[in-house]
Amino acid sequence: MTSPMILFLILAGLSIVFSLLVVFQRNVVYSAMALVATLFLIAVLFLTLEAAMVGILQILVYAGAIMVLFLFVIMLLNPGLLEGRSIAWWILGSLAAVLLLFVLVPFLSDSGRLLPGQAPAGGSFGSPESLAQSLFTDFVLPFEIASVLLLVAIVGAVVLAKREV
Amino acid sequence: MVPLNYYLVLSAVIFAIGVTGVIIRRNIIVILMSIELMLNAVNLTFIAFSRSLGSMDGQVIVFFVMTVAAAEAVVGLAIIISVFRHRQTLDPREMQLLKW
């Protein structure tokens, strides 16, 4: 086994374990911390796929900003008690996940035959320059729309969360 | 080199775990976190295909997915705060005023 393979298997195993912890941990704060760990591991997976810029953005935006927001809301609301478990929903949820995997996994593990092999990436692949090059030429309209979307989200959040005056 | 299939199967597994979380959990904050988990699984697929096809488009789309996820988390959490203020609960099965 080559060393990228070993690295991938370690990262994959850890990210599956931590995402299971997100779902099956009964304490909300522990769930959030497990989600932070999962996001970090996925960022490292991005780095192994030569997407350096997106990996760093993942850590900054997701594991930094969004998770701090989640933790802030958890601490603000402080629901205290652990949630109860209902067996029927557990069976339904696990069944849905298993069925989804039965549909997806055979198809996905077959798809290597349909695709060309790993293309040799140039030195600048995934760098900020190449991302910006693509973002500001082919995707400039979606980029502007995204800025409007963020503005709408800011205003909406302020209006929704403020107390009635 | 790690084959593309491994990344695809890993992201399918993480996506299925996120689906399970949305169905079984009874805390709406954890449900939002499971949705973030699913979005990340899809991002992993985009990045894997981007690497395999040698095109930057996948990474740009991941950038937009992150933007939309941030907006969704912000608005979702604001709605949660405002619902909690009125009903003192985080259980989505209690929020059924519009249920027929």
Image (cartoon, grey):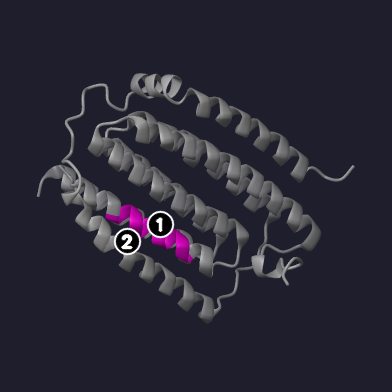
Q: Is mark 1 in CB contact (under 8 Å) with mark 2?
A: yes
Q: Is residue A47 toward the left or the right of residue B28 in the image?
A: left
Q: Is residue B70 toward the left or the right of residue B7 in the image?
A: right
Residue positioned 49% across, 63% down in the render: B21
Most common secondary structure along the magenta stretch? helix
- Image x and y of residue A103, in percent: 33, 65
**Relative to A21, is B70 above or below?**
above
Q: Give the camera-side residue of B61 and A129.
A: B61
Verify whether residue B95 appears in magenta: no
Q: Chain of mark 2?
A: A
Residue A2: which quarter of the image? Answer: top left
Q: Give the camera-side residue of A56 and A33.
A: A56
Q: Which mark is residue A104?
A: 2
Q: In what element is the residue under mark 1?
A: helix
Name the residue tied to disc 1: B15
Q: Which residues are magenta?
A: B9-20
- Image x and y of residue A85, in percent: 55, 76
Q: In what element is the residue under mark 2?
A: helix
Q: Name the quadrant of the N terminus of chain B.
A: top left
**Relative to A149, is B75 above or below?**
below
